[in-house]
Image: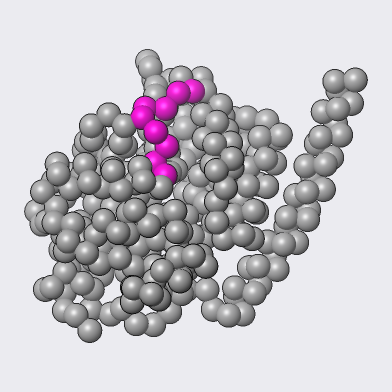
Amino acid sequence: MHSAGDGRPDDVSGPLEAPEALPDGHGAAAAVAHPPAVNVAAFFDVANTMVRGASAFLLAKGLHARGFFDTVMIVRGMWWHAWYRIAGKERANHMEGAREGMLSMIRGARVDEIADAADEIYDELISQRLWPGTVALAAEHIAAGHQVWLVTAAPVEVATLMAQRLGLTGALGTRAEHIDGAYTGRLLGDMLHGPAKAEAIAALAAERHLDLTASHAYSDSSNDLPMLDLVGHPNVVNPDRKLRRRARSTSWPIREFRTGRRAALLGASSVLGAGALLGTLSAVATVLRRRRA
């Protein structure tokens, strides 16, 4: 084991995830008024690394319950979420659809209304889906004096709220444009996904003088390989098949918080859920066709 003094948490065993803006194109917000004066950081992906499932979908589910958008959109999001859990990977058209869906669902909404709703949704839906093991890893880094950042394609407002609740340094996330306190339905820069995460981390490191060779990153997805390759201490949590192969070939630490029985149950529930969702999608499509007729 390595000691905290060399930039790694002590334990890597077991069933082992005042706002400041970065340059345009990257979303960031500090979750504490006085971040640690250190140059080592740990970067955590959110979906399936810090949270079971996708935080953006959980936000959408909560906003739908509060009447922010219609049922067709949430059903589409449920299908993407089910696919992600069954296949263990993302598809490009799903990410594009998620981007458009996220923007359309908040277009015209007040920033303060979304913030208030997100605060409630965190307590109702997100907090109970946190992986305790990943939260413990983040706490180890905080205890070691490291900066700890969430890095996610989800809206930066949601990521920052999570960072604040967990006592982390801050968050990098997708930034939506707002004018006069209302969302316009357009992004500022790109969705923070894939290579864009590595670019955002590099910009943050330059701004805060972080030593990336001494820093850590955690993710479940092979889409985050650019982020993992950027740091000196990459780690994988609940990995997809491609990322697990890469981790084994490079001897990266693997934390698996899904026990065999639990993973089987999650897979079964996801498959059953997908069947129900397909039926719901079919029903919605039938209603829409009748309306057009």
The main secondary structure of the magenta stretch is: loop
Where, quadrant-wise, is the C terminus in this rendering? Answer: top right
Residue 246 seen: yes
Q: How is the image coloured?
A: one colour
Between residues 225 and 238, which one lies in front from this camera angle? 225
Q: Residue at x 42, y 27 (%)?
A: 187
Does the magenta portion include 167? no
Establish if 263 lies above or below 222: below
Q: Residue at x 55, y 51 (%)?
A: 90
Establish if 24 lies above or below 61: above
**Relative side of 120 to 93, left or right:** left
Q: Residue furthest top?
A: 180
Between residues 119 and 157, which one lies in front from this camera angle? 157
Residue 51 seen: no
Establish if 32 lies above or below 110: below
Q: Residue furthest front?
A: 249
Q: Residue 269 location, x and y as percent?
A: 70, 65
Where, quadrant-wise, is the N terminus in this rendering? Answer: bottom left
Q: Residue 69 location, x and y as percent?
A: 62, 30
Between residues 254 and 229, which one lies in front from this camera angle? 229
Tell me where residue 26 sits by quadrant: top left
**Relative side of 268 to 231, left or right:** right
Q: Residue at x 13, y 73 (%)?
A: 6
Q: How many marks?
A: 0
The span picked out in magenta is: 185-193
**Relative side of 18 to 268, left or right:** left
Q: Residue 168 location, x and y as percent?
A: 27, 55
Q: Residue 143 location, x and y as percent?
A: 20, 68
Tell me where residue 225 sits by quadrant: bottom left
Q: Residue at x 51, y 20 (%)?
A: 108
